[in-house]
Image: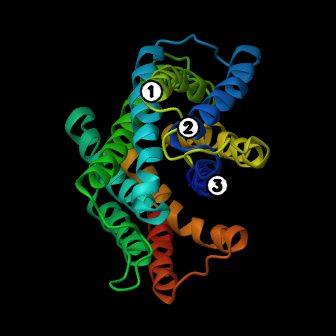
Amino acid sequence: MIPAALATLLFALSSVAARRSIHHLGSSTASLVRILLAATVLGIYAHGWGAGLGGIALPWFIVSGLIGFGICDTALFLALPMLGAQLASLMVQCLAAPIAALTEWLWLGTRIDSENLQAGGLILAGVAIALLPQRGRSVHPPLTPNAILLGVVAAAGQGIGAVLSRHGQLLARDSGHPVDGLSVAYQRILAGVAFTIGWWLWQRARTPVPVGGPAGTSLPWRRAWPWVILNGLSGPCLGVACYQWAFQTHPTGIVMSITALTPLVVIPISWAVEGIKPSPRSVVGGCIAVAGAIWLALHR
């Protein structure tokens, strides 16, 4: 469970940094710069010390990256301004785990016993209790069909991309040539880079400023760079590497139930960085989710 826990912490850091990056640069530009930085760092490692572009599972990792990095991340970055960070994280993390578990069961035949299902359900319930907005006190903008659709697309992309990646991991392992997590992250991110560049160019052709950015103002790159670097390294680089490491030893549904704690880990980080204090309900939900994670870890 250590790789999944590390991935959870890194994804939480990436989430906070992503919000700050989008604030400064807009959705499409923040996503593009983030993924280019991560791809550069991962490429240096993969071609210098890792597997590079070799391995029998390369096609699976590329398709996984197209869905998980390209479609999922683009939908998530577009959803953040409309849903708010907490609700967007809630939708993606809570929906991605069951989507991944269902996909893996239908396609790969991976069965999860009832106790694992109960523990994973407890984690997701705790996340929902902690982060669902309260009536009359919600800081989120009103929900729209487009916002909900983007959240569901992001969740489905993350879940299905994770299953494809795990399938590639199993193929590589069974062939006697397993691929390390950083090299897998590099092979996956290449298709995501192509998708994100295409999306950015299309958006630039449609509007003179990046989507989500402040109209009529110049981009504050100096303020944005620290957040862009933190976002790129903690999320698609080290976070995804730990994510792939976890898939080598645990089913997708189990790993994604642990990483569903990411929105809760965001709470203390946001408190420290942005001064957003957690509500009593978020503390209760966090305790429930952590209890589920402990139950899951002990049962494994």
Q: Residue at x 77, y 49 (%)?
A: 223
Place residue 5 in its image quadrant: bottom right
Spatial distance from mark 2 to mark 1, Cα to Cα?
Answer: 10 Å
Place residue 54 in its image quadrant: top right
Q: Amino acid at mark 3?
A: Arg
As helix, strand or loop, the secondary structure at mark 3 comes to helix
Residue 20, numbered label:
3
**Residue 112 visible at all:** no
- Choose the circle earlier in sequence order: 1 or 3: 3
- Choose the circle earlier in sequence order: 3 or 2: 3
As helix, strand or loop, the secondary structure at mark 1 comes to helix
**Mark 2 in CB contact with mark 1 (< 8 angstroms):** yes
- Choose the circle earlier in sequence order: 2 or 1: 2
As helix, strand or loop, the secondary structure at mark 2 comes to helix
Residue sticking out furthest to the left = 106
Neighbour tally class for label 3: few under 14, some 14-19, many 20 plus, Cα within 10 Å: many
**Mark 3 in CB contact with mark 2 (< 8 angstroms):** no
Q: Which residue in the protein does label 2 denote? A: 31
Say left or right for 117 vs 14.
Answer: left
Q: Amino acid at mark 1?
A: Trp
Question: 119 or 183: which is nearer to us?
Answer: 183
Q: Which residue in the protein does label 1 denote? A: 199
